[in-house]
Image (cartoon, grey):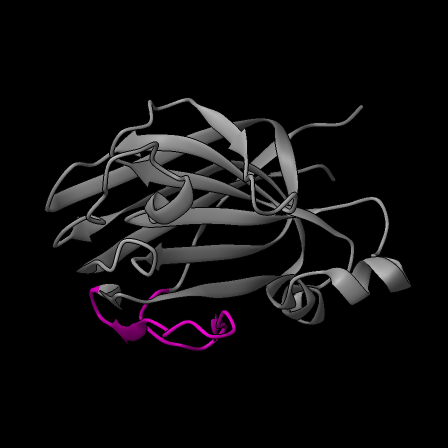
Amino acid sequence: MFFLLLATITVPLGSPDGWHHLSFGGLTPNTVHYGAEGIRIEVRRSSSPLFRPFPSTLAVRRLSASGRATGVPSLSDGAEGDGRNDDYTLRVGLAVEGRDSLGFFQRLFAPSWLKRLIELAPDPRIDRVSFLCLAQRREPGSRRRHPRSRYVEEDVAARVTGPGPFAIDHRFEPALRSLGLWVHADGDDTRSEFDVAIQSIGIETDETP
């Protein structure tokens, strides 16, 4: 007989230890500060993710985050997430374990950020990054596979339309077998400037002895 245990992990935010500040080729990176109040990301028409690999694969059942933003991306006419509107106040995501490693030709044409994740993760079998997004126009609960990358999927976790506090709290059914945590605020497409302070991130995992 197996008994399902739930373990709650509070992700450390006050130090850069364990975090990797990645970059997208050709884009101005964000400025990131770590301190007693958490992680503060300065977006200045910029975009860059933070990745924190787990020591080993975790079956993540629940992911939560809270904080405060000084603003939101300046969206133009058109659909949020498309074209020049592909910016979000915050995405918090999980690198999801796949069945197989990328083959030679897959790796050859894979985006540079995915190759870097493969280098950092405890297991090279990464299937995708599954994001929880703070959106302005898209409805909470809506989901899509990103039109620019088959390695990215997005769920709208909550809506935020201006400065102020935010909260994300999402349960995964079934649990996602995950290799690491991805945090991303961006304003490069919309030429936006704002700050995001992340004050807490919590992960609930399944453990079966």
Range drawn in magenta:
13-37
Q: Residue at x 69, y 27 (%)?
A: 3
Q: Is residue 5 above or below residue 75?
A: above
Q: Residue at x 43, y 23 (%)?
A: 142
- How many labels were placed on the picture? 0
Q: Residue at x 32, y 71 (%)?
A: 30
Q: The N terminus is located in which quarter?
A: top right
Q: Quadrant of residue 176?
A: top right
Rendering coords of residue 15 (x, y %): 35, 75
Magenta portion: prevailing SS class? loop
The answer to whether any part of residue 165 appears in the image is yes
Q: Quadrant of residue 137?
A: top left
Horizontal arrangement in the rendering, residue 96 relative to residue 69 (left or right):
right
Q: The C terminus is located in which quarter?
A: top right
The answer to whether any part of residue 123 appears in the image is no
Horizontal arrangement in the rendering, residue 37 relative to residue 204 (left or right):
left
Q: Is residue 152 above or below residue 45?
A: above
Rendering coords of residue 192 (x, y %): 21, 58
Horizontal arrangement in the rendering, residue 8 relative to residue 110 (left or right):
left
Rendering coords of residue 146 (x, y %): 54, 40
Rendering coords of residue 181 (x, y %): 52, 55
* Residue 155 among magenta residues: no
Q: Residue at x 83, y 44 (%)?
A: 99
* Residue 18 among magenta residues: yes
Horizontal arrangement in the rendering, residue 50 relative to residue 61 (left or right):
left
